[in-house]
């Protein structure tokens, strides 16, 4: 599975590449509804450094992120489910799975389908 | 020795004095009282007994006379006349039931009026008798009692009544007598027999009115005086007791006192009065008798011949006077005790302030000024104590002040002494100093010659310095010119560095553009990778190209970051160079300023050296003048030495006076130390 990795605060976050249409510089498209990744994950909004927009496929929605880091191929065994108690307290926009690579931080995944239309 | 306690204490003396003042007159009075002998007491008792007896007899006499007048009034009263006329008229009629009824009607019609009149006049009894036959027509309560001749009755009271009636019948005058029905005193009655004359002036009836002896008894009982054993009774001419007040309440049977010495003497001596001593058994008695004379007019006949007798035991007289003496003595003693305590208080009140003042004076004599007696008395003694206390306080204050003054004087003396010693030492030092100064002035005078030579040498050296400094001023001027050239070069370098900095900023801007392009390229490479990924197997090769482009972009970004850091370093270095150049410029400016200042200073030094040369000449002249002055100073110092010698002698004299002054102060301190005040304690 291909994952687009982008910077989120001091860590990383990912989104499935098949859900993404394209990446565009911030402020270049006024037709899309832009959701700030900080806002929808539930954090207090902070200023972006080198912000970009990730346009979602088949939806007029874009995510404003800090910086694109990588496009990575991830195997199925690298996914693992979070415990139910942790899931109860997680934001609904995030997937219940996370990606774990050895010697790296745990990567959260954004669920594009759970990003609200409004 | 025994009376020393009196001599030593003012209080005891005063107490004794007060007691003597009280005791002497009291003793005199007591002596007079004790000389009030039994004979005098007996005389007083006789006078009192006789006087009181006479008074009572007179009262009784007056009472009986008053009743007689009232009885006479009754006999002339209209009601009585009409009543007796009615009786006579009825008696003329033959005896019948009709006559009895007429009697009853008469009593009903007149009886009550007569009774009321009799009671109003103070009588309780009324009887009516027929004169000729002596028949009793109406009894005491005006009941009809035609009982025949009363002369035949032998009863005790009736016999007495018959005696009165016979007297009235034979004399035709009012007759008074006392009678007792039952022989007891409380039943005794005083009867008044009154002749009644009809309208023709014929003596037809006898009226008998009477009243109880109670009033007489009461008058005889009034005021027994101060003697407990006094006994009073009333007897008639037959030695019959008709009143004995002490026994009035228990129906004392009337008896005769025929064997009573006093009664016999009184009746024998009637109608005179007297007091005499007599023996009654074992008891010595004193008695008085006073007659009661009831016959005051010719129209009244009486057989009263009453005598009021009072008697008492002579022992009672002595006892009474003894009791009075004991009471007087008790009162005297009581007053004496009171006087003693009063005297004690007064003596204490007088002696205490004097004692306080004495203590104060003793302590004062011992030099102790710490005792300040106080007194709340407002009299002269209190004033004396307070004045004494104030005197000690004032003395204490004066001694305190004197002590302070002496201490101050002592301190001043010591100070003067030490000052004089110091002055003496200073004087000696001054003399030595004057000598030293004198020798110094000699050396000074010698030195002036050497100074004069030195001044001339200085003048020559000043000339040489002037030449050298002028040369140095030229050298400094050329250095200053070189520094200006360097300053211009430095300013030019700063301009170049600033230009270099501006260029590096332009390079930074270009690097920003390159960064932006790299970012765009990175996005494009990401999109290309996305496209390749969505294209599946066919897009793999395109994906590789996209990845290569993305890596290349990242390398470019890294390179631009490195260039950015290099440019930043260049800018930092440029800034440092500019700062260093500016600092150099400032230093050059300071050097130039210093050079200018040095030139200025050298010019001033040159000017100063010129002035110094002139001054040196003036100094040489002044040194010569000072040599002359030094000679004059030496002359003055000799005079000063002589003055110091005189000063030293004067100080010696002051020192001796100071020693004497300290001696006097010490003597004064010794005197003052003998006084002890609260401050000194």
Image (spheres, helix red, strand yellow):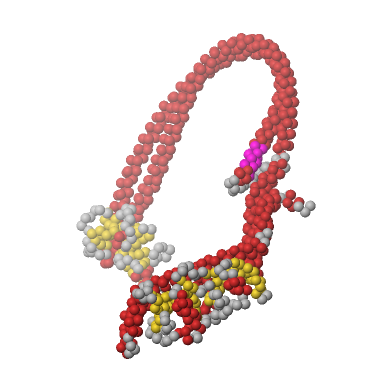
Residue B533 versus residue B156 in the image, above or below: above
In the picture as drawn, the residue positioned furthest to the left comes out as A31
Residue B441 versus residue B161 in the image, above or below: above
- The magenta segment: B385-400
Which image quadrant is residue B37 in?
bottom right
- Residue at x 74% of width, y 49% of height: B7
Q: Is residue B541 visible?
A: no
- Measured as percent of width and height from the top left, residue B570 is found at 40, 41
In the picture as drawn, the residue positioned furthest to the right comes out as B1
- Residue at x 43% of width, y 35% of height: B579
Residue A50 versus residue B665 in the image, above or below: below
Residue B234 versus residue B419 in the image, above or below: below
- Residue at x 72% of width, y 40% of height: B674
Q: Is residue B455 visible?
A: yes
- Measured as percent of width and height from the top left, residue B61 is found at 49, 69
By secondary structure, the bulk of the magenta-drawn segment is best described as helix
Residue B246 relative to residue A117: left or right? right
Residue B310 relative to residue B212: left or right? right
Asked if the magenta segment contains residue B506, the reply would be no
Residue toward you, B464 or B246: B246
- Measured as percent of width and height from the top left, residue B238 is found at 56, 77
Residue B277 relative to residue A109: left or right? right
Which image quadrant is residue B653 in?
top right
Asked if the magenta segment contains residue B386, the reply would be yes
- Residue at x 69% of width, y 28% of height: B416
Looking at the figure, which quarter contains the C terminus of chain B?
top right
Which image quadrant is residue B618 in?
top right
Count of picture labels: 0
- Measured as percent of width and height from the top left, residue A107 is found at 37, 64
Residue toward you, B174 or B49: B174
């Amino acid at each position: 599975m291909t994952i687009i990795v982008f910077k989120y605060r001091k860590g990383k976050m990912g989104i499935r590449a098949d859900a993404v249409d394209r990446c565009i510089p911030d402020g270049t498209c006024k037709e899309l509804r832009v959701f700030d990744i900080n806002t929808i994950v539930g954090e207090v909004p902070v200023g972006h450094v080198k912000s970009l927009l990730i346009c979602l496929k088949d939806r007029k929605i874009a995510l404003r992120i800090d910086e694109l880091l990588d496009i990575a191929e991830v195997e199925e065994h690298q996914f693992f489910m979070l415990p139910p108690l942790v899931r109860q307290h997680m934001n609904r926009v995030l997937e219940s799975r996370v990606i774990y690579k050895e010697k790296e931080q745990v990567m959260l995944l954004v669920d594009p389908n759970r990003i609200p239309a409004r | 020795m025994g009376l020393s306690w009196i001599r030593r204490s003012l209080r005891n003396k005063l107490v004794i004095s007060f007691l003597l003042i009280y005791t002497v007159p009291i003793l005199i009075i007591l002596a007079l009282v004790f000389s009030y002998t039994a004979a005098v007491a007996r005389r007083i008792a006789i006078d009192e007994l006789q006087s009181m007896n006479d008074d009572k007899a007179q009262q009784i006499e007056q009472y009986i006379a008053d009743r007689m007048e009232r009885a006479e009034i009754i006999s002339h009263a209209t009601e009585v006349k009409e009543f007796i006329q009615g009786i006579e008229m009825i008696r003329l009629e033959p005896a019948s039931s009709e006559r009895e009824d007429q009697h009853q009607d008469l009593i009903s019609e007149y009886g009550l009026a007569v009774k009321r009149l009799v009671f109003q006049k103070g009588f309780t009894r009324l009887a009516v008798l027929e004169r000729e036959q002596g028949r009793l027509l109406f009894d005491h309560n005006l009941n009809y009692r035609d009982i025949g001749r009363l002369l035949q009755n032998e009863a005790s009271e009736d016999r007495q009544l018959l005696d009165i009636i016979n007297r009235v019948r034979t004399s035709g005058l009012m007759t008074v007598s006392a009678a007792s029905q039952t022989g007891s005193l409380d039943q005794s009655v005083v009867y008044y027999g009154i002749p009644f004359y009809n309208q023709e002036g014929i003596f037809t009836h006898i009226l008998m009115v009477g009243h109880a002896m109670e009033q007489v008894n009461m008058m005889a009982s009034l005021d027994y005086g101060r003697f407990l054993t006094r006994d009073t009774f009333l007897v008639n001419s037959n030695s019959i007791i008709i009143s004995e007040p002490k026994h009035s309440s228990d129906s004392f049977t009337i008896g005769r006192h025929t064997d009573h010495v006093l009664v016999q003497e009184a009746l024998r001596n009637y109608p005179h009065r007297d007091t005499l001593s007599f023996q009654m058994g074992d008891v010595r008695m004193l008695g008085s008798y006073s007659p009661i004379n009831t016959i005051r007019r010719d129209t009244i006949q009486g057989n009263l011949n009453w005598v009021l007798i009072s008697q008492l035991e002579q022992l009672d007289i002595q006892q009474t006077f003894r009791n009075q003496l004991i009471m007087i003595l008790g009162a005297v003693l009581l007053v004496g005790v009171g006087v003693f305590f009063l005297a004690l208080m007064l003596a204490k009140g007088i002696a205490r302030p004097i004692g306080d003042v004495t203590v104060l004076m003793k302590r004062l004599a011992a030099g102790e000024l710490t005792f300040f007696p106080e007194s709340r008395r407002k009299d002269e003694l209190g004033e004396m104590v307070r004045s004494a206390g104030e005197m000690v306080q004032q003395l204490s204050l004066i001694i305190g002040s004197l002590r302070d003054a002496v201490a101050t004087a002592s301190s001043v003396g010591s100070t003067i002494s030490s000052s004089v010693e110091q002055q003496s030492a200073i004087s000696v030092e001054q003399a030595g100093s004057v000598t030293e100064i004198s020798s110094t002035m000699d050396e000074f005078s010698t030195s002036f010659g050497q100074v004069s030579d030195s001044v001339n040498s200085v003048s020559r050296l000043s000339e040489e310095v002037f030449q050298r400094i002028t040369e140095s001023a030229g050298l400094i001027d050329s250095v200053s010119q070189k520094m200006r050239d360097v300053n211009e070069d430095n300013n030019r370098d700063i301009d170049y560095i600033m230009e270099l900095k501006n260029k590096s900023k332009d390079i930074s801007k270009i690097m920003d553009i390159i960064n932006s392009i790299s970012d765009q390229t990175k996005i494009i490479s990401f999109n290309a990778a996305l496209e390749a990924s969505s294209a599946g197997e066919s897009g793999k090769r395109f994906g590789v190209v996209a990845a290569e482009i993305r890596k290349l972009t990242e390398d470019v970004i890294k390179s631009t970051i490195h260039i950015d850091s290099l440019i930043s370093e260049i800018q930092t270095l440029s800034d440092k160079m500019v700062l260093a150049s500016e600092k150099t410029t400032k230093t050059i400016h300071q050097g130039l300023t210093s050079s200018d200042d040095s030139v200025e200073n050298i010019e001033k030094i040159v000017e100063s050296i010129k002035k110094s040369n002139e001054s040196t000449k003036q100094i040489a002249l002044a040194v010569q003048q000072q040599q002359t002055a030094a000679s004059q100073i030496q002359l003055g110092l000799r005079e000063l030495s002589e003055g110091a010698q005189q000063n030293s002698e004067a100080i010696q004299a002051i020192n001796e006076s100071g020693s004497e002054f300290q001696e006097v102060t010490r003597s004064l301190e010794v005197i003052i130390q003998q006084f002890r005040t609260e401050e000194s304690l």
